[in-house]
Image (cartoon, grey):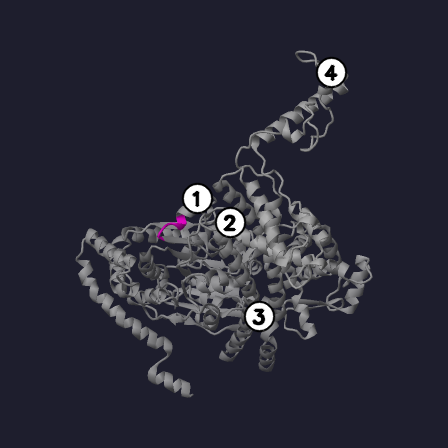
Amino acid sequence: MLKNLVQKVIGTKNDRELKRYKKRVKKINDLEPKYEKYSDEELKEAFNAIKEKVKKGEATMDEVLEDSFAITREASKRVLGMRHYDVQLIGGMVLHDGKIAEMKTGEGKTLVATLAVALNAMTGEGVHVVTVNDYLAKRDATEMGKLYNFLGYNVGCITSEIDDDQERKKQYLADITYGTNNEFGFDYLRDNMKYSLDEMVQRGHNYAIVDEVDSILIDEARTPLIISGPTNRKLDNYVRADKIAKQMIKDEDFTVDEKNRVILITEKGIEKAEKLFGVNNLYDLENAILAHHLDQALKANFLFEKNVDYVVKDGEVVIVDEFTGRLSEGRRFSEGLHQALEAKEGVEIKEESQTLADITFQNYFRMYKKLAGMTGTAQTEATEFSQIYGLEVISIPTNKPVIRKDLDDLIYKTEKEKYEAVVKKIKELHKKGQPVLVGTTSIEKNELLHELLKKEKIPHAVLNAKHHEQEAEIIAQAGKKGAVTVATNMAGRGVDIKIDDEVRSLGGLFILGTERHESRRIDNQLRGRAGRQGDPGASQFFLSLEDNLLRIFGGDRIKNIMERLGIEEGEHIESKMVTRAVEKAQKKVEALHFESRKHILEYDDVANEQRKTIYKFRHELLNPKFDIDSKIKENRREYIDELLSECEIFPESPKEDFNLEKLVLKLKEELRSEFSEDELKDKDYEELKEYIIEKLEEEYEKKMSVVDEEQRREIERILYLQILDNGWRDHLYQMDILKTGIGLRGYNQKDPLVEYKKESFNLFMELVRNIKNEVIKTLHTIELRDEKEEEEIKRLEAELKRMEEELKAGAVMQHGNEVKNESAKPNTGAKKPKRNEPCPCGSGKKYKHCCGKSGPKKGVLASSVNG
């Protein structure tokens, strides 16, 4: 009560922020008459002048904001024929301040972004504008590009169609780059797998504006970006597990917890599975993989629904994004679940993959120096934006008041009754001529409604993941008189539905929701498709007690109300209390999802620190100025320290206790370096260590002397990078295994996250040590051969092979003069001579000093790298 009183007197924080922005809006408006008088050339010159000031550091972006916004607005009027409203100027300032602008649908968010983009691109460090799909990225880059070009900027666009790295690099080098979240994220991961700075396409993370920020930073944040490679594991176990899962009986052999999406096998189920697998104990270490496969097979068969969670398209299982209803081509469920679904559907099972590089959207977008976002629906997730990204949400009023009528939900007992009522309502609206957009939560329900409307001969357009190529076109027609459009949740995010005066007189666009989504934002997004810019419109949701949300999270309470009221078949209840109960159920699910995303992030934060360390060092290695020589010397020292310790040689031990025999063997085995016990004895710890290091350095320098300085650095750099990458991949695989089983530590009264941090730190320290040691072993054991020698060996091998074949055929031919010396006959053994063996030409010299010898040609690495 006190809080409400204080808010009434001094206003909310949001009100106070808006008041502050409105003062600046007035200053921008005051500049409008000044810039209206300028010619195009004068306007461009004025913008370039303030751009130069910012670039040189003579003025900050904040100081030139009013002029920048005023010029951008004037340029927009001339180039695009659109003038920014006052509320759009406020939106631009919110974005410039690195906050989230919550603006209702139809308020022109695309145009709002131009103000902050034009201002922030002045530094020359690049601005990224992130959209939800390629279509919007291309559309916005083309349309808004005209304005940016007028202001002297060039615009790039990154889409999945561009597969040439140099072309991508060119797009990133533009002042302003549009693209999707997936493309930006994957380019970052791919860049950190490159072997040259020139091959990297991104140039840093300066400032990003994320359009539909709730969709990208929240809905998609539960799925990390992963680049993977094959693991070469057996695939037949998936089919076995699927057959066994199909023989299990629900509620007898296992129970399903739909709320938490978990399946628990009963004692009876375990016995049955052991019998069917033909094993004594399913949870023995050797059978752990079978238990895992069975878990995933049960999930695939009893938790995941075809045409709801996934579709089968062209013989492949394709994920359906639960928030947008779009097909997520190229994405796969992890931990063998995707293979379990492939086995269930009887399509080709693809190899399980191993992570080569991964990152969550949270950690990718937190790399930007400044981040901002726009959406129509953000307040419901304001806490998450603040906690995870440090982003404040500012709700911006609409340009014209919203007059859309949001009607109370109608609730029916069964799904059948609900759909009958939905069809009846659509028929009624269609007859009247009022356009209707029908929202469904899955492809399956979308197609069910399509069939019902076909039966009733109601003309309609269907929009779901299977036809999203024509999405924009279908949505654009949805406001025409008498139009009926049935859409999944995506409902054309980012595309406005325009209506004419005749439709306005009929009540505007009617939004009909056939089910509440788990997230209130998605429902609000659907509602927001109507009533743009003061247009009339209406929205209503038709629900049933059989809907997943009500059945799992809140059905009993509503069911009791319906029974008390004695609701007959076909009748519905409509009350504020029921609508509140539904919202309560949604809040429960939102809280669950927030915890799930937070959980993923907590674990990824551990990996993220390691990722940043590895990628930072990798970047240093790619820099030609990096002192790799000192790094190798430092690694060699650490390696010898470790080797001495392994051979029980410690600073405090007496000389006579040193295990020199083991040390000599290790040096020969791991570094191919010849030492004798005699030369090492009578030396104390420090003398011994320095003597070995000095000798190894001499050997190494001698070996590397056959190549010039530049080639030597290149060899060292490439080898270091290869070892680093291989080690990192193996480490990610170990981390995946660790993450899979760490939850079980909870049964031992231990916090799994604390245990994960501890174990992963140990794994990381081991990785760093292994990389350093492997680099020293490899650099000391590689051989630098020269090309002439390689060619000579190949020529000699071919000659020997030819002679051997001739001997076998019993027809040795003499070429030219007869052989005068018996011992000069070539050795016709099939084996290639070793370097220290007698030369096959019969000279009596060792092969390496005779035919195997040639003047070294610089810079060729041995064909096999050992170590």
Q: Earlier in the sequence, mark 3 or mark 2?
A: 3
* SS under mark 3: helix
Q: CA distance from mark 3 to mark 2?
A: 62 Å
Is label 1 in contact with label 3 (beta carbons under 8 Å)? no
The residues bearing labels 4 and 1 have C-alpha atoms spaced at a distance of 58 Å
**Residues packed near mark 3 inside 10 Å, few (<14), some (14 to 19) or many (20 plus):** many
Q: Which residues are magenta?
A: 171-175
Q: Earlier in the sequence, mark 4 or mark 2?
A: 2
Whether residue 867 is visible here, answered yes or no, is: no
Q: Position of residue 845 (x, y in %)?
A: 67, 27
Q: CA distance from mark 4 to mark 2?
A: 55 Å
Q: In the rendered structure, which amino acid carries the disc numbered 4?
A: Val
**Residue sitting at 63 percent across and 61 percent down?**
304
Which residue is denoted by mark 2 in the rendering? 629
Q: Is residue 170 above or below residue 63?
A: above
Q: What amino acid does circle 1 point to?
A: Gln
Residue under label 3, please give it.
Answer: 549
According to the picture, the residue beneath numbered tag 4 turns out to be 812
Residue 174 is covered by the magenta coloring: yes
Percent coordinates x, y for residue 339 in the rendering: 66, 54
Which of the marked residues, 3 or 4, is nearer the chain's N terminus?
A: 3
Q: Are marks 1 and 2 in contact (CB under 8 Å)?
A: no
Comparing 242 with 283, the one in front is 283
Residue under numbered circle 1: 166
> Disc 1 or disc 2, which is closer to the eye?
2
Amino acid under disc 3: Leu
Q: CA distance from mark 1 to mark 3?
A: 48 Å
Relative to 150, is 477 on the left or the right? right
Q: Residues within 10 Å of mark 2 (few under 14, many from 20)?
A: few
Q: Nearer the viewer, residue 192 or 791?
A: 791
User: Who comes first in sequence, dot 1 or dot 3?
Assistant: 1
Q: Nearer the viewer, mark 1 or mark 3?
A: 1
